[in-house]
Amino acid sequence: MKDNPVQKSNKWLKDLSEGVIGHELEALTLQGLQIVNAYRGFVRCNFTIPIRLADNHGNWQVGAMATLIDDVGAAAIYSFAGHIKASVDFIISFYSSVKIMEEVEIEAKVVGERGRLTSVKVEVRRKDNGEVIALGKQWMVSNSINAAQGKGRMATSPFPLFITIGLHLLFFTAFSAATTSSTGIRLGIIRKPSSQPHLSTFREAPAFRNGDSCDTQKIHVTMTLDANYLRGTMAAVLSILQHSTCPENFEFHFLWAHFEPDVSASINSAFPYLNFHVYKFDSSRVRGKISKSIRQALDQPLNYARIYLADIIPADVKRVIYLDSDLVVVDDVAKLWEVDLEGKVLAAPEYCHANFTNYFTELFWSDKSLAKTFDGRQPCYFNTGVMVVDVDKWRQGGYTRKVEEWMSVQKQKRIYHLGSLPPFLLVLAGNIKGVDHRWNQHGLGGDNIEGKCRSLHPGPISLLHWSGKGKPWLRLDSRKPCTVDHLWTPYDLYRPSIHSLEE
């Protein structure tokens, strides 16, 4: 027992749940917790929600859930580091509610380490169907007393005790009235200003590491890179890595129209460990092909780069996930990567309830030769901001040329209004592999004219997409955010002035 940190962490968590150590609040929250699997840096537990933890609606109180996430995460770190650490940064996203007497599974895994800091990811799922209820991510730090003595949160040092009590009191008071819609919570300690005179406007992201079950298969993600959207790109990359079981397997391919040294330096600074490549997109390829659309941002050459990605990225890359820069992922992207394309060139969520005719002008539908384009197909709208693309099949099928042909028709006749999306629909709508809508909760940026606030669509969510005019970072900076914009905030690496933890 003395030299086995896994056994010690299991005993610590068991003692907490039974009230042998810790605070009465923790015993109240954890009583009945069952450890079903544990090894170094990993803990999995089962828990049946008792009546005592119900809120006024008969749901598992989110404050109690947060306390459980905190303690199970701490146990995973205990088994990894050999002693308890104090929480200094804690983010939780809630996705669904849980009724009393439902059984859940809690899984905590250490995902990063930097100096005295250790990072853990905790996932709460329904036991019967695996639906994600909440995701917690926290950084914990050791101090000299805690590390040397190997004591728990009841150590004589006031630092961990202050953090723990503060966390639990805040959760049970502030969150007892919270809703169960997805939201982010960030807690921290007082930070000491850094003595470094010059720091990047983006803080460095944690270094996320692969879990024990990971293989070496690469997951290729393609995004465009533009100074105006860099803040969004940074958030998207962080969200992908943070929610991935195998973050080191990702290889990013960025397309940019202009060489911008500050942009490249910012990526290297924020993600010094990131495996990425930058490719030049020759904007002359779309010169003379772009028609004016209803929003100026849609007319930028880089918005059309996705059409040419198969010609730009290396030939040995056979499949990519293409993602816009105005989104964040709240699930493991590997699940999207593994989708069976069933011989199709592209996979994306389809929205067959949308009025497909609205994406083209009356001139298009009144022209019989154009309208018959969709004969033999059942076309549905899909958003090109989230796509899995068989790059080999795209090249072999000459899809770039097919899309360009419709762009040429648009220059002669006004057959659509929306930038690069309609030619994709003309070529591929009704002939793609549809995937679950959870992979593109789109339209959060509102419409293309005013960008008014919109609510989340019902159903599970794996990806949040601010397509439309409104971008979360701009609305937050203007102090006029929409409710959904706060779901983006936990992934924002931008810092006008940066402070660092005192080492």
Image (tube, helix red, strand yellow):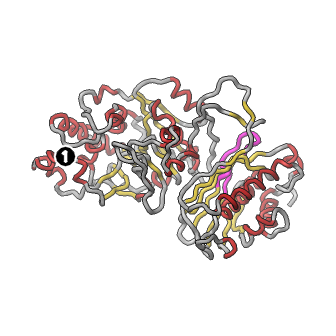
Tag 1's secondary structure? loop
Residue in the picture at 57% in, 37% down: 274
Residue 248: x percent and y percent? Answer: 58, 44
Which of the image's four quarters has the C terminus? top right
The residue that disc 1 covers is 361
Residue drawn at (60%, 34%) of the image: 495
Would you place residue 325 above or below residue 377 in this image?
above
Nearest the viewer among 90 and 142 is 90
Question: Horizontal and vertical percent for residue 360?
Answer: 21, 47
Determine whether 72 is above or below 189 in the image.
below
In percent of width and height, residue 41 lies at 71, 54
The 10 Å Cα crowd at callout 1, few under 14, some 14 to 19, many 20 or more, is some
* Magenta part, dominant SS: strand
Q: Quadrant of residue 105?
A: bottom right
Query: Residue shown at 39%/36% (left/top)?
Result: 315
Quarter occupied by the N terminus:
bottom right
Q: Position of residue 280 (x, y in %)?
A: 41, 27
Q: Which residues are magenta?
A: 108-121
Q: Is residue 111 above or below residue 458?
A: above
Residue depicted at 33% across the width and 57% down the height: 351
Using residue 112 as the reference point, say whether residue 282 is left or right of it: left
- Is residue 439 in sight in this rendering? yes
For badge 1, the amino acid type reads Thr
Q: Nearer the viewer, residue 135 or 218?
A: 135
Q: Is residue 250 left or right of residue 432?
A: right
Location of residue 309 (image quadrant): top left
**Residue 115 falls inside the magenta stretch:** yes
Nearest the eye: 2 or 67? 67
Question: Is residue 442 shown left or right of residue 117?
Answer: left
Tell me if residue 262 is in the magenta stretch. Answer: no
Q: How many marks?
A: 1
